[in-house]
Image (tube, rainbow, N blue to C red):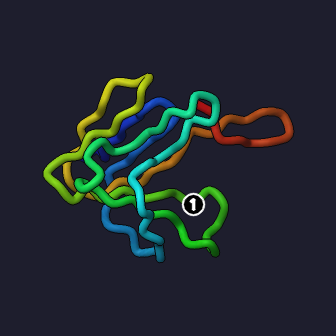
Amino acid sequence: MTTPLYRHGDVLLQATTAPTTPLHRQPHTTLAHGELTGHQHRIAEASAAELFAPTPTARPGDPQFLHVTAPHATLVHEEHAPIRLPAGWYRVWQQREYTPGSVRVVQD
């Protein structure tokens, strides 16, 4: 059985089980901000999902987790087609790129 993956620009989501690490529930459902455009990768139906971030003591680069609590939620961004996510848990992270001497988050 394969694990579903969803790519939305520089954001990647992987279906997973409920995380066991401590997380902080966020007051929003914005997965990533576009540093260059100001656009956001976000859930259109805010009441359909919950976003969780690593605790302040987490390792750098630890992922966020999205919990779709409704039958589905729609991931939207002004420059990408919407993606319909079924209910469940998702690991969320932003694409990184290597440049000589550093690794950095891709800027949208």
Residue 101's quadrant in the figure? top right
Give the residue at x 63% y 29%: 36
Give the residue at x 71% y 41%: 104
> Is label 1 in a helix, a strand or a loop?
loop
Q: Position of residue 3 (x, y in %)?
A: 31, 47
Instruction: Tell me how many marks there are.
Output: 1
Q: Residue furthest left?
A: 71
Q: Is residue 48 left or right of residue 21?
A: left
Q: Circle 1 sits on which residue?
A: 62
Q: Is residue 17 above or below residue 87?
A: below
The amino acid beneath tag 1 is Asp
Q: Is residue 4 left or right of residue 86?
A: right
Q: Position of residue 28 (x, y in %)?
A: 41, 56
Quadrant of the drawing holding the C terminus: top right
Q: Position of residue 74 (x, y in %)?
A: 26, 40
Give the residue at x 29% y 34%: 83
Q: Position of residue 22 (x, y in %)?
A: 47, 76
Q: Is residue 74 left or right of residue 65?
A: left
Label 1 packing within 10 angstroms: few (<14), some (14-19), many (20+): few
Q: Nearer the viewer, residue 51 or 13?
A: 51
